[in-house]
Amino acid sequence: IKQQKISTNTKDNLIKLIQSLNNEEMKNKIIFKKQYICAN
């Protein structure tokens, strides 16, 4: 039971990590687009 709990926690943490990375990537893309539009 304990092992199962740890594995689900790890899975949740991985999902959260991936989501936060995706959010950072999206923010960077938006900033890049804004800078690109301003430059043109």
Image (cartoon, grey):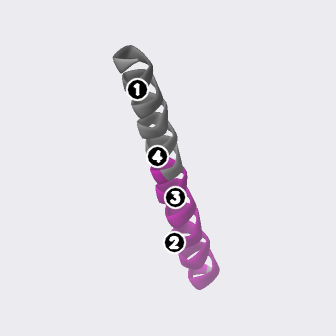
Foreground residue among 40 and 29? 29
Q: Of circles 4 and 1, which is in front?
A: 1
Q: Residues within 10 Å of mark 4 (few under 14, many from 20)?
A: few
Residue bearing mark 4: 16
Report whether 15 appears left or right of 17: right
- Which callout, 4 or 3, points to the residue nearer the camera? 4
Q: Earlier in the sequence, mark 2 or mark 1?
A: 1
Q: Which mark is residue 23?
A: 3
Name the N-terminal-most of marks 2 and 4: 4
Going by the numbered disc 1, the residue's amino acid type is: Lys
> Splitting the image into 4 quarters, where does residue 32 fall?
bottom right
Residue 2 counted in the magenta span: no
3 relative to 23, above or below: above
- Residue that carries the numbered disc 2 in the rendered image: 31
**Few, some or many C-alpha atoms within 10 Å of disc 1 (few <14, some 14-19, many ≥20)?**
few
Residue 29 in percent (x, y) is at 58, 62
Secondary structure under badge 4?
helix
Q: Residue at x 50, y 62 (%)?
A: 28
| Residue type highlighted by circle 4 | Lys
Answer whether labels 2 and 4 touch (C-beta < 8 Å).
no
For the residue marked with disc 2, what is the amino acid? Ile
Q: Position of residue 4 (x, y in %)?
A: 44, 19
> What range of the chain is rendered magenta?
20-39
